[in-house]
Each structure stands twice: as C-alpha cells, then as structure tokens.
Image (spheres, helix red, strand yellow):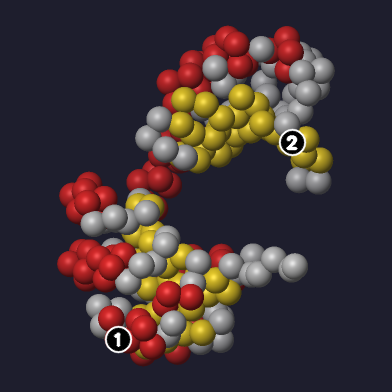
Amino acid sequence: MLNQKKEFVVIGLGRFGSSLCMELTDIGIEVVAIDKDPEKVGEFSSIVSHAVELDAVDEEGLNSVGIRNFDCVVVSIGEDIQASILITLILKEMGIKQVWVKARNHYHQKVLEKIGADRIIHPERDMARRIAHHIGNDKVTDYIEISKSYSIVEIMASDKLAGKTLGELDAFDKYHCKIVAIKKNEDDVSVMPSLNTRIDLNDILVTIGKNKNLDKFEEERV
C-alpha cells in the first residue's frame, strides 16, 4: 500500500501562517489555507492546494471544507487571542486529532493548554532562543527546543574535539548527551555514528540532551 500524503490546514495567513504554508508546500505536503481576508486568500490560491475565504469561528464553515479529514490543523492567528482560543475549542470539540496553535504570550498558552491544544508554538520566542544560543557560542550553528527540558543542538567541532573518536569523547557517560549525527557537509551526513567515528575540525555534531547537560558539554568541550 502506498503511503498517503499528509494534509494540513493552516488557519490564519499572517506572517507565520503564510511562511508555514509556503514551507509545507515546498516539501510536498498538501495544504488548505483558511483566512477571512479575501486578499490574502487570493494571494495564496496559486500557492497552496486550496485557499478558502472563511471565518474559522464558524463551525458549519469548517465542516464545509471537510476539516475532520485532515491530519493536522494549525491555528496561526496571533493577534486576536479570543478568536484563537474559540477556534481551538471548536476544533477539539469537533474531534480533530492534532490541533497546533500559535500562542502570543504565556497567558494565551495557559488557556490553550486547558482547552486541549496538542502543541503550542511560540515562533518569536523559539527564534530568539536560537539566535541567543548562536550569539552566546559561535560554535553552535543551530538550536531546536523539543520540550521544556530537552533540546537538539548543532555544534561545530573545535580544536578540542578534532581528532578524537566519539568513544574517546564519551559524551553520553560524561555529559548524558547523545551525538545522533555528524555532518561533514550537506552531502555527507552520518546518522547514528559508531563510537569509532573520528571527529574532524569543523564537523557539525548533532547532539540531543537535557538543556543543562548540553550547556555543560558546550562549555567544557567546545
């Protein structure tokens, strides 16, 4: 049986929603974009699979686009917190399995958690953290938070690491971090490398662990 393509709905075509639609489309995911602004809908009609002019607080309107048939619905309305909360509540009551919501602030997040949002997104905060990690340590090339306590960090190998094997580095026992991939360049990526893998200068080490352990690893080994 062939794998079916994933299908997403994005509600709200502001800066975040627009960017998300374009990125999802670029990687081959079917996207239905919903917004009540006819100009934004017209702009995206040739970009996404289907663009719909609709006020998403209208449950009948959501039913008319077959909202229950999609893998995930992303509510990307950031400015109108009341609408964001109401739409999230409607979607959960309709039985949508995955509802991801952009939160404007901590209080918005707390309400979304209480009404059952499956994932809460803070694009500005997350980008700020990634930039802060990069500024704080120029060997950190990327940073992705996967929970409040765990992250994935891409670290460029310095002189301290060059020439060592992963076994000699012993990141798991010493720092409780796991190096899950080594990137030599865009076309040479070793996933789940063995302990015998030797680290070269400027290799990118894709490392996962608790934030406090990653900080210690960066401080002592990078």
- Label 1, residues with CA under 10 Å away: few <14, some 14-19, many ≥20: few
The residue carrying mark 1 is 60
Quarter placement of the C terminus? top right
* Residue occupying the point 37% across, 35% down: 148
Q: Which quadrant of the figure has residue 67?
A: bottom left
Foreground residue among 35 and 160: 35
Q: Residue at x 49, y 34 (%)?
A: 151
Judged left or right of residue 110, residue 197 is: right
Amino acid residing under circle 2 = Val
Name the quadrant of the N terminus: bottom right
Vertical relation: 187 (above or below) 8: above
In the image, residue 171 sits, relative to residue 203, either above or below, namely above
Q: Between tags 1 and 2, which lies in front?
A: 1
Q: Which residue is mark 2?
A: 191
Q: Where's residue 28, x and y in %?
A: 65, 69
- Of callouts 1 and 2, the N-terminal one: 1
Residue 152: image tag: none
Callout 1, which amino acid? Glu
Residue 194 location (% of width, % of height):
78, 23
* Coordinates of residue 43 in the picture (x, y in percent): 47, 85
Q: Secondary structure at mark 2?
A: strand
Towards the viewer: 194 or 203? 194
Contact check, label 1 and label 2, Cβ < 8 Å: no
Q: Quadrant of residue 2?
A: bottom right
Residue 174 coordinates in the image, percent (x, y): 58, 9
Q: Can residue 36 be seen in the rendering of this structure? A: no
Horizontal side, residue 95 vs residue 50: left or right: left
